[in-house]
Amino acid sequence: MKIKKHILPLLVALNFAPLFLTAQNKTTSVHFDFYGDSVSLQFDDALFINFPEPLSEQAILEFNQKISETDYLPVISTLLSYKKQYNLDDWLYYQLIRKTAQHISPKADNYTRYTLYKWFFLTRSGYDAMLNIHRDKILFYVQCDENIYNIPYRVKNGKQYVCLNYHDYGAIDFNQVSFDEVVLNIPEAAKGFSYKVTHLPHFRPGDYMEKDLRFNYNESDYYFKVKLNPEIKTIFANYPVVDYASYFNIPLSTETYKSLIPALKKTIKGLNAKNGVDYLMRFTRYAFLFEPDSSDFGKEKRLSPEQTLLFDKSDCEDRAALFFYLVKEIYDLPMIVLSFPTHVTVAVKFDRPVGKTILYNGEKYTVCEPTPQRIDLNIGELMPSLEKATYEIAYAYHPVTK
Protein backbone atom coordinates (compact mmCIF):
# COMPACT_ATOMS: atom_id res chain seq x y z
CA MET A 1 0.00 0.00 0.00
CA LYS A 2 1.66 3.22 -1.10
CA ILE A 3 0.32 5.44 1.59
CA LYS A 4 0.12 9.17 1.18
CA LYS A 5 0.70 11.20 4.27
CA HIS A 6 -2.59 11.52 6.11
CA ILE A 7 -3.34 14.15 8.66
CA LEU A 8 -5.61 12.41 11.14
CA PRO A 9 -7.46 14.96 13.27
CA LEU A 10 -6.70 13.10 16.48
CA LEU A 11 -7.04 15.20 19.59
CA VAL A 12 -4.50 14.44 22.27
CA ALA A 13 -2.66 16.12 25.14
CA LEU A 14 0.70 17.81 24.75
CA ASN A 15 2.28 15.61 27.39
CA PHE A 16 4.29 13.54 24.88
CA ALA A 17 6.89 16.13 23.90
CA PRO A 18 9.48 13.66 22.49
CA LEU A 19 7.02 12.65 19.76
CA PHE A 20 6.12 16.13 18.61
CA LEU A 21 7.48 17.72 15.51
CA THR A 22 5.40 20.89 15.42
CA ALA A 23 3.00 22.59 17.81
CA GLN A 24 0.54 25.42 17.35
CA ASN A 25 -2.57 26.28 19.35
CA LYS A 26 -2.42 23.08 21.40
CA THR A 27 -2.20 20.91 18.30
CA THR A 28 0.80 18.80 17.51
CA SER A 29 1.86 16.84 14.44
CA VAL A 30 3.77 13.58 14.73
CA HIS A 31 4.85 10.98 12.24
CA PHE A 32 5.14 7.22 12.44
CA ASP A 33 5.98 4.47 10.00
CA PHE A 34 3.21 2.08 9.00
CA TYR A 35 4.92 -0.82 7.26
CA GLY A 36 7.12 1.30 5.06
CA ASP A 37 5.04 4.44 4.65
CA SER A 38 4.90 7.68 6.62
CA VAL A 39 1.63 8.59 8.32
CA SER A 40 1.15 12.06 9.85
CA LEU A 41 -1.09 12.61 12.84
CA GLN A 42 -2.33 15.90 14.26
CA PHE A 43 -3.29 15.93 17.93
CA ASP A 44 -5.05 18.32 20.28
CA ASP A 45 -5.71 17.75 23.95
CA ALA A 46 -9.49 17.24 23.76
CA LEU A 47 -9.35 13.53 22.96
CA PHE A 48 -6.75 12.73 25.57
CA ILE A 49 -8.47 11.33 28.65
CA ASN A 50 -6.51 10.62 31.79
CA PHE A 51 -6.99 7.20 33.37
CA PRO A 52 -6.09 7.03 37.06
CA GLU A 53 -5.13 3.89 38.90
CA PRO A 54 -6.42 1.53 40.13
CA LEU A 55 -8.36 -0.28 37.40
CA SER A 56 -12.08 -0.52 38.07
CA GLU A 57 -15.36 -0.75 36.23
CA GLN A 58 -16.31 2.76 37.35
CA ALA A 59 -13.05 4.22 36.03
CA ILE A 60 -13.65 2.59 32.62
CA LEU A 61 -17.23 3.86 32.50
CA GLU A 62 -16.02 7.39 33.28
CA PHE A 63 -13.31 7.13 30.62
CA ASN A 64 -15.89 6.07 28.05
CA GLN A 65 -18.26 8.86 29.05
CA LYS A 66 -15.59 11.53 28.75
CA ILE A 67 -14.15 10.39 25.43
CA SER A 68 -17.63 9.91 23.96
CA GLU A 69 -18.32 13.58 24.59
CA THR A 70 -15.36 14.68 22.46
CA ASP A 71 -15.41 15.31 18.72
CA TYR A 72 -14.01 11.87 17.85
CA LEU A 73 -16.02 11.20 14.68
CA PRO A 74 -13.47 12.80 12.30
CA VAL A 75 -10.85 10.42 13.68
CA ILE A 76 -12.99 7.35 13.00
CA SER A 77 -13.98 8.66 9.59
CA THR A 78 -10.33 9.12 8.62
CA LEU A 79 -9.33 5.66 9.87
CA LEU A 80 -12.18 3.97 8.03
CA SER A 81 -11.43 5.96 4.89
CA TYR A 82 -7.86 4.77 5.08
CA LYS A 83 -9.06 1.18 5.55
CA LYS A 84 -11.28 1.41 2.47
CA GLN A 85 -8.76 3.19 0.26
CA TYR A 86 -5.98 0.70 0.89
CA ASN A 87 -8.21 -2.37 1.22
CA LEU A 88 -7.00 -3.21 4.72
CA ASP A 89 -8.22 -6.51 6.11
CA ASP A 90 -9.43 -6.40 9.70
CA TRP A 91 -6.10 -7.66 11.06
CA LEU A 92 -4.13 -4.91 9.26
CA TYR A 93 -6.71 -2.32 10.30
CA TYR A 94 -6.23 -3.39 13.90
CA GLN A 95 -2.48 -2.88 13.48
CA LEU A 96 -3.19 0.69 12.34
CA ILE A 97 -5.39 1.19 15.40
CA ARG A 98 -2.63 -0.19 17.63
CA LYS A 99 -0.09 2.27 16.23
CA THR A 100 -2.54 5.15 16.55
CA ALA A 101 -3.26 4.27 20.19
CA GLN A 102 0.47 3.95 20.88
CA HIS A 103 1.06 7.53 19.75
CA ILE A 104 -1.77 8.86 21.90
CA SER A 105 -1.07 6.81 25.01
CA PRO A 106 2.16 4.78 24.90
CA LYS A 107 1.72 1.22 26.08
CA ALA A 108 4.62 1.44 28.51
CA ASP A 109 3.22 4.55 30.22
CA ASN A 110 -0.27 3.27 31.02
CA TYR A 111 -1.23 -0.15 29.67
CA THR A 112 -4.89 0.15 30.67
CA ARG A 113 -5.31 3.51 28.93
CA TYR A 114 -3.53 2.20 25.80
CA THR A 115 -5.93 -0.78 25.73
CA LEU A 116 -8.95 1.48 26.20
CA TYR A 117 -7.95 3.61 23.20
CA LYS A 118 -7.66 0.47 21.06
CA TRP A 119 -11.07 -0.68 22.27
CA PHE A 120 -12.57 2.77 21.66
CA PHE A 121 -11.27 3.12 18.10
CA LEU A 122 -12.30 -0.43 17.20
CA THR A 123 -15.84 -0.19 18.61
CA ARG A 124 -16.43 3.25 17.09
CA SER A 125 -15.28 1.76 13.80
CA GLY A 126 -18.28 -0.54 14.08
CA TYR A 127 -16.73 -3.70 15.54
CA ASP A 128 -18.42 -5.59 18.37
CA ALA A 129 -15.88 -5.76 21.20
CA MET A 130 -15.94 -6.14 24.97
CA LEU A 131 -13.74 -5.48 27.99
CA ASN A 132 -13.23 -7.85 30.92
CA ILE A 133 -11.31 -7.02 34.09
CA HIS A 134 -9.85 -8.73 37.14
CA ARG A 135 -7.93 -6.59 39.62
CA ASP A 136 -5.15 -4.95 37.57
CA LYS A 137 -5.73 -7.00 34.40
CA ILE A 138 -7.86 -5.93 31.44
CA LEU A 139 -8.73 -8.29 28.57
CA PHE A 140 -9.95 -6.96 25.25
CA TYR A 141 -12.19 -9.27 23.19
CA VAL A 142 -13.65 -8.90 19.69
CA GLN A 143 -16.58 -10.79 18.22
CA CYS A 144 -15.41 -13.34 15.64
CA ASP A 145 -17.25 -16.31 14.09
CA GLU A 146 -14.11 -18.01 12.74
CA ASN A 147 -12.19 -20.93 14.25
CA ILE A 148 -9.37 -19.39 16.28
CA TYR A 149 -7.09 -21.55 18.41
CA ASN A 150 -4.75 -21.25 21.40
CA ILE A 151 -6.12 -17.96 22.73
CA PRO A 152 -8.97 -17.34 25.20
CA TYR A 153 -12.51 -16.76 24.03
CA ARG A 154 -15.85 -16.04 25.65
CA VAL A 155 -19.40 -16.70 24.52
CA LYS A 156 -22.05 -14.06 25.01
CA ASN A 157 -25.59 -14.26 23.65
CA GLY A 158 -24.53 -17.18 21.50
CA LYS A 159 -21.65 -15.22 19.92
CA GLN A 160 -17.93 -15.99 20.20
CA TYR A 161 -15.54 -13.28 21.38
CA VAL A 162 -11.79 -13.79 20.90
CA CYS A 163 -9.16 -12.12 23.09
CA LEU A 164 -6.92 -9.62 21.26
CA ASN A 165 -4.39 -8.88 24.02
CA TYR A 166 -3.87 -12.14 25.89
CA HIS A 167 -0.24 -12.27 24.72
CA ASP A 168 0.55 -9.23 26.87
CA TYR A 169 -0.04 -11.27 30.03
CA GLY A 170 1.80 -14.45 29.07
CA ALA A 171 -0.52 -16.90 30.79
CA ILE A 172 -3.66 -16.67 32.90
CA ASP A 173 -5.21 -19.60 34.74
CA PHE A 174 -8.89 -19.04 34.07
CA ASN A 175 -9.75 -21.87 36.44
CA GLN A 176 -8.34 -19.78 39.27
CA VAL A 177 -9.12 -16.26 38.04
CA SER A 178 -12.56 -14.94 37.19
CA PHE A 179 -12.91 -11.91 34.90
CA ASP A 180 -15.99 -9.69 34.90
CA GLU A 181 -17.36 -7.94 31.85
CA VAL A 182 -17.59 -4.16 31.90
CA VAL A 183 -21.00 -3.63 30.34
CA LEU A 184 -20.90 -0.80 27.80
CA ASN A 185 -23.67 -0.17 25.31
CA ILE A 186 -22.19 0.93 21.98
CA PRO A 187 -25.05 0.80 19.41
CA GLU A 188 -22.79 1.17 16.36
CA ALA A 189 -20.51 -1.69 17.48
CA ALA A 190 -22.20 -4.63 15.77
CA LYS A 191 -19.76 -5.95 13.15
CA GLY A 192 -17.77 -9.16 13.54
CA PHE A 193 -13.99 -9.25 13.14
CA SER A 194 -12.24 -11.49 10.61
CA TYR A 195 -8.71 -12.87 10.90
CA LYS A 196 -8.52 -13.61 7.18
CA VAL A 197 -5.57 -11.84 5.53
CA THR A 198 -6.09 -11.46 1.80
CA HIS A 199 -3.72 -8.53 1.13
CA LEU A 200 -0.30 -7.61 2.43
CA PRO A 201 1.18 -4.09 2.43
CA HIS A 202 3.10 -2.91 -0.62
CA PHE A 203 6.35 -2.46 1.27
CA ARG A 204 9.06 -0.21 -0.08
CA PRO A 205 11.34 -2.28 -2.36
CA GLY A 206 14.37 -0.97 -0.47
CA ASP A 207 13.10 -2.48 2.80
CA TYR A 208 13.47 -6.04 1.55
CA MET A 209 16.45 -8.25 2.24
CA GLU A 210 17.66 -11.07 0.01
CA LYS A 211 17.80 -14.69 1.10
CA ASP A 212 19.54 -17.47 -0.81
CA LEU A 213 17.65 -20.75 -1.14
CA ARG A 214 19.15 -23.85 -2.66
CA PHE A 215 18.23 -27.51 -3.08
CA ASN A 216 19.11 -30.48 -5.25
CA TYR A 217 16.70 -31.99 -7.75
CA ASN A 218 17.61 -34.92 -10.00
CA GLU A 219 21.30 -34.48 -9.14
CA SER A 220 21.29 -30.81 -10.14
CA ASP A 221 21.62 -27.85 -7.77
CA TYR A 222 19.12 -25.03 -8.00
CA TYR A 223 19.54 -21.57 -6.47
CA PHE A 224 16.97 -18.87 -5.80
CA LYS A 225 17.55 -15.38 -4.43
CA VAL A 226 14.29 -14.41 -2.75
CA LYS A 227 13.40 -10.92 -1.50
CA LEU A 228 11.82 -10.94 1.94
CA ASN A 229 10.62 -8.22 4.28
CA PRO A 230 11.32 -8.59 8.03
CA GLU A 231 8.14 -6.58 8.74
CA ILE A 232 6.19 -9.76 7.97
CA LYS A 233 7.36 -11.05 11.36
CA THR A 234 5.94 -7.92 13.02
CA ILE A 235 2.59 -8.15 11.26
CA PHE A 236 2.08 -11.75 12.34
CA ALA A 237 3.87 -11.61 15.71
CA ASN A 238 0.62 -11.95 17.69
CA TYR A 239 -1.46 -13.52 14.94
CA PRO A 240 -3.28 -16.51 16.41
CA VAL A 241 -3.58 -20.04 15.08
CA VAL A 242 -6.35 -19.89 12.47
CA ASP A 243 -7.92 -22.64 10.40
CA TYR A 244 -6.23 -24.03 7.31
CA ALA A 245 -8.53 -22.25 4.86
CA SER A 246 -7.44 -18.89 6.27
CA TYR A 247 -3.69 -19.27 6.61
CA PHE A 248 -3.13 -21.39 3.47
CA ASN A 249 -4.51 -18.49 1.45
CA ILE A 250 -2.43 -15.67 2.93
CA PRO A 251 -0.63 -14.27 -0.14
CA LEU A 252 2.99 -13.30 -0.70
CA SER A 253 3.92 -9.63 -0.65
CA THR A 254 4.65 -8.02 -4.01
CA GLU A 255 8.45 -8.11 -4.08
CA THR A 256 8.62 -11.61 -2.61
CA TYR A 257 6.19 -12.83 -5.25
CA LYS A 258 8.14 -11.15 -8.08
CA SER A 259 11.44 -12.61 -6.88
CA LEU A 260 10.22 -16.21 -6.56
CA ILE A 261 7.18 -17.16 -8.61
CA PRO A 262 8.49 -16.11 -12.07
CA ALA A 263 11.80 -17.88 -11.31
CA LEU A 264 10.00 -21.09 -10.37
CA LYS A 265 7.77 -20.87 -13.45
CA LYS A 266 10.82 -20.43 -15.65
CA THR A 267 12.59 -23.41 -14.07
CA ILE A 268 9.67 -25.82 -14.52
CA LYS A 269 8.61 -24.53 -17.92
CA GLY A 270 8.11 -27.47 -20.27
CA LEU A 271 7.44 -29.98 -17.48
CA ASN A 272 4.05 -31.64 -17.29
CA ALA A 273 1.92 -30.95 -14.21
CA LYS A 274 3.04 -34.09 -12.37
CA ASN A 275 6.77 -33.39 -12.79
CA GLY A 276 6.32 -29.70 -12.09
CA VAL A 277 4.46 -30.43 -8.85
CA ASP A 278 7.19 -32.93 -7.96
CA TYR A 279 9.76 -30.14 -8.36
CA LEU A 280 7.74 -27.79 -6.14
CA MET A 281 7.28 -30.56 -3.58
CA ARG A 282 11.03 -31.13 -3.32
CA PHE A 283 11.79 -27.42 -3.29
CA THR A 284 9.46 -27.02 -0.30
CA ARG A 285 10.89 -30.16 1.31
CA TYR A 286 14.60 -29.49 1.01
CA ALA A 287 15.18 -25.72 0.71
CA PHE A 288 14.51 -25.21 4.45
CA LEU A 289 15.53 -26.80 7.72
CA PHE A 290 12.91 -28.67 9.71
CA GLU A 291 12.04 -27.70 13.28
CA PRO A 292 8.81 -28.43 15.21
CA ASP A 293 6.93 -25.45 16.63
CA SER A 294 7.47 -26.68 20.20
CA SER A 295 11.23 -26.32 19.73
CA ASP A 296 11.23 -23.14 17.66
CA PHE A 297 8.41 -21.12 19.29
CA GLY A 298 7.53 -23.07 22.43
CA LYS A 299 3.94 -23.46 21.18
CA GLU A 300 1.99 -24.17 18.02
CA LYS A 301 2.37 -21.41 15.46
CA ARG A 302 1.19 -21.75 11.88
CA LEU A 303 3.36 -19.82 9.46
CA SER A 304 2.01 -18.21 6.31
CA PRO A 305 3.80 -19.03 3.03
CA GLU A 306 5.93 -15.88 3.26
CA GLN A 307 6.80 -16.52 6.90
CA THR A 308 7.98 -20.01 5.92
CA LEU A 309 10.28 -18.42 3.36
CA LEU A 310 11.46 -15.86 5.91
CA PHE A 311 12.20 -18.20 8.82
CA ASP A 312 15.17 -20.55 8.61
CA LYS A 313 13.21 -23.45 10.11
CA SER A 314 9.63 -24.67 9.73
CA ASP A 315 7.43 -27.68 10.43
CA CYS A 316 5.01 -29.81 8.40
CA GLU A 317 2.06 -27.40 8.62
CA ASP A 318 4.20 -24.49 7.42
CA ARG A 319 5.58 -26.44 4.45
CA ALA A 320 2.12 -27.70 3.56
CA ALA A 321 0.94 -24.07 3.42
CA LEU A 322 3.85 -22.99 1.20
CA PHE A 323 3.52 -26.01 -1.09
CA PHE A 324 -0.22 -25.44 -1.37
CA TYR A 325 0.36 -21.79 -2.29
CA LEU A 326 2.96 -22.62 -4.95
CA VAL A 327 0.84 -25.31 -6.60
CA LYS A 328 -2.23 -23.09 -6.54
CA GLU A 329 -0.37 -20.09 -7.95
CA ILE A 330 1.51 -21.96 -10.71
CA TYR A 331 -0.84 -24.81 -11.66
CA ASP A 332 -4.12 -24.02 -9.88
CA LEU A 333 -4.94 -27.69 -9.37
CA PRO A 334 -7.55 -29.07 -6.95
CA MET A 335 -6.01 -29.98 -3.59
CA ILE A 336 -6.96 -31.34 -0.19
CA VAL A 337 -5.15 -30.93 3.13
CA LEU A 338 -4.81 -34.16 5.13
CA SER A 339 -4.60 -33.69 8.88
CA PHE A 340 -3.29 -36.71 10.80
CA PRO A 341 -2.95 -36.69 14.61
CA THR A 342 0.78 -35.89 14.32
CA HIS A 343 1.25 -34.71 10.74
CA VAL A 344 -0.21 -32.52 7.99
CA THR A 345 0.31 -33.09 4.28
CA VAL A 346 -1.27 -32.30 0.93
CA ALA A 347 -2.82 -34.33 -1.88
CA VAL A 348 -3.17 -32.98 -5.44
CA LYS A 349 -5.62 -34.00 -8.15
CA PHE A 350 -3.93 -34.81 -11.46
CA ASP A 351 -5.57 -35.91 -14.68
CA ARG A 352 -4.11 -39.34 -13.94
CA PRO A 353 -3.64 -40.23 -10.27
CA VAL A 354 -0.29 -41.62 -9.11
CA GLY A 355 0.47 -44.10 -6.32
CA LYS A 356 -1.27 -43.45 -3.00
CA THR A 357 -4.54 -41.66 -3.63
CA ILE A 358 -7.25 -40.24 -1.40
CA LEU A 359 -10.84 -40.45 -2.59
CA TYR A 360 -12.71 -37.23 -1.86
CA ASN A 361 -16.09 -36.26 -3.31
CA GLY A 362 -15.72 -38.90 -5.99
CA GLU A 363 -12.28 -37.67 -7.15
CA LYS A 364 -8.85 -39.22 -6.58
CA TYR A 365 -6.11 -37.02 -5.09
CA THR A 366 -2.44 -38.01 -5.14
CA VAL A 367 -0.45 -37.61 -1.91
CA CYS A 368 2.46 -35.14 -2.29
CA GLU A 369 4.66 -34.93 0.83
CA PRO A 370 6.34 -31.46 1.18
CA THR A 371 8.07 -32.21 4.51
CA PRO A 372 11.41 -34.09 4.74
CA GLN A 373 11.14 -37.66 6.05
CA ARG A 374 13.60 -40.43 6.88
CA ILE A 375 13.04 -41.81 3.41
CA ASP A 376 12.88 -39.84 0.17
CA LEU A 377 9.19 -40.12 -0.71
CA ASN A 378 8.09 -39.81 -4.32
CA ILE A 379 4.79 -38.39 -5.49
CA GLY A 380 2.07 -40.82 -4.50
CA GLU A 381 3.96 -42.17 -1.48
CA LEU A 382 2.85 -41.71 2.11
CA MET A 383 4.95 -42.28 5.21
CA PRO A 384 4.62 -45.97 6.17
CA SER A 385 3.66 -44.98 9.73
CA LEU A 386 0.62 -43.14 8.37
CA GLU A 387 -0.66 -45.84 6.02
CA LYS A 388 -3.28 -47.02 8.52
CA ALA A 389 -3.59 -43.82 10.55
CA THR A 390 -6.85 -41.91 10.73
CA TYR A 391 -7.03 -38.46 9.18
CA GLU A 392 -9.48 -35.73 8.31
CA ILE A 393 -9.79 -33.49 5.28
CA ALA A 394 -8.94 -30.20 6.98
CA TYR A 395 -9.35 -28.07 3.85
CA ALA A 396 -10.35 -28.69 0.25
CA TYR A 397 -9.55 -26.37 -2.64
CA HIS A 398 -11.11 -26.56 -6.08
CA PRO A 399 -10.39 -23.91 -8.75
CA VAL A 400 -13.29 -21.73 -9.77
CA THR A 401 -14.38 -22.60 -13.28
CA LYS A 402 -14.12 -19.53 -15.47
Image: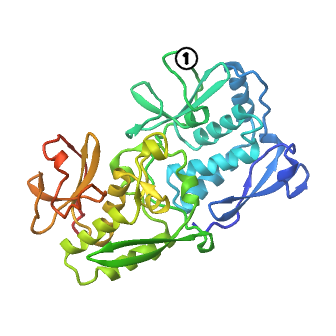
Left or right relative to 260: residue 211: right
Residue 84 x %, y %: 54, 58
Residue drawn at 75 percent across, 41 percent down: 105
Determine whether the residue tagged by mark 1 lies in a helix, strand or loop. loop
Would residue 184 be seen by someone viewing this image from the given angle? yes
Picture quadrant of residue 381:
bottom left
- Tell me which colouring the rendered structure shows: rainbow
Total residue callouts: 1
Reply above or below: 128 against 78.
Answer: above
Label 1 CA crowd tier, 10 Å (few <14, some 14–19, many 20+): few
Q: Amino acid at mark 1?
A: Val
Picture quadrant of residue 48:
top right
Left or right relative to 295: residue 64: right
Reply above or below: 212 against 392.
Answer: below
Residue 367 x %, y %: 18, 58
Reply above or below: 56 against 198.
Answer: above
Left or right relative to 340: residue 300: right
Residue 142 x %, y %: 51, 36
Nearer to the camera, 2 or 175 = 175
Residue 194 x %, y %: 45, 45
Residue drawn at 54 percent across, 58 percent down: 232
Would residue 262 be seen by someone viewing this image from the given angle? no
Instruction: Quadrant for the N terminus, please.
Output: bottom right
**Would you name the residue on which mark 1 appears?**
177
